[in-house]
């Protein structure tokens, strides 16, 4: 019985830890139209967060490549493209990395934080200082 209680406590702690992390699948929502665009998988590698496009809802856009990218992502298919790179834990959020806008090829500084009990991810891309940018709120999918 004691072992069961300990296992349940450890499982609960692991679940709570997972909810406090942006690692997982997120439904992306356009900040201008409010429409769901697709999904981005956020993952951790070497202590930093990265995000990869996993799904694009519009079949015409899903077949496109990043023609406007100016780095190693140029010409790569949008589905499977790494759009977030190198964000590290910074207090209650993550910062110090970049985010790519595949429509313009622009690469911006980025920060993000969890909201609504870990069910939303506020992603901000900006130039120079965080005030000069825009945010999107993504919704946890799994």
Image: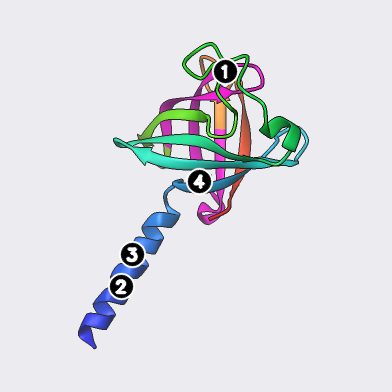
Q: Which residue is mark 3?
A: 13
Q: Quadrant of residue 45?
A: top left
The local crowd at label 2, few if under 14, some if 14 to 19, many if 20 or more residues have their Cα within 10 Å, is few
Q: Quadrant of residue 28?
A: top right
Q: Mark 4 or mark 1, which is nearer to you?
A: 1
Q: Are marks 3 and 2 in contact (CB under 8 Å)?
A: yes
Distance from label 4 to label 3 (Cα)?
18 Å
Q: Which residue is mark 1?
A: 75
Residue in the image at 54% along x and 11% along y: 70
Q: Which residue is mark 2?
A: 9
What's drawn in magenta, residue-wise?
94-123
Q: Is residue 113 or residue 34 the one in the foreground?
A: 34
Which residue occupies the extreme right position in the image? 33
Q: Which residue is mark 4?
A: 114
**Where's residue 38, x and y in %?**
65, 41
Q: Mark 3 or mark 1, which is nearer to you?
A: 1
């Amino acid at each position: 019985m004691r072992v069961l209680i300990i296992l349940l406590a450890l499982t609960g702690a692991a679940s709570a830890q997972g909810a406090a992390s942006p690692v997982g699948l997120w439904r992306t929502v356009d900040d201008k139209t409010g429409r769901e665009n697709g999904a981005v998988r956020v993952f951790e590698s070497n202590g930093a967060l990265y995000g990869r496009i996993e799904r694009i809802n519009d079949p015409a856009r899903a077949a496109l490549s990043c023609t406007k990218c100016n780095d190693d992502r140029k010409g790569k298919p949008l589905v499977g493209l790494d759009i977030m790179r190198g964000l590290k834990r910074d207090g209650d959020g993550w910062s110090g990395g970049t985010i790519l806008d595949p429509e313009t090829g622009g690469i911006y500084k980025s920060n993000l934080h969890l909201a609504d009990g870990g069910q939303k991810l506020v992603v901000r891309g900006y130039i120079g200082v965080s005030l000069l940018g825009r945010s999107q709120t993504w919704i946890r999918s799994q």
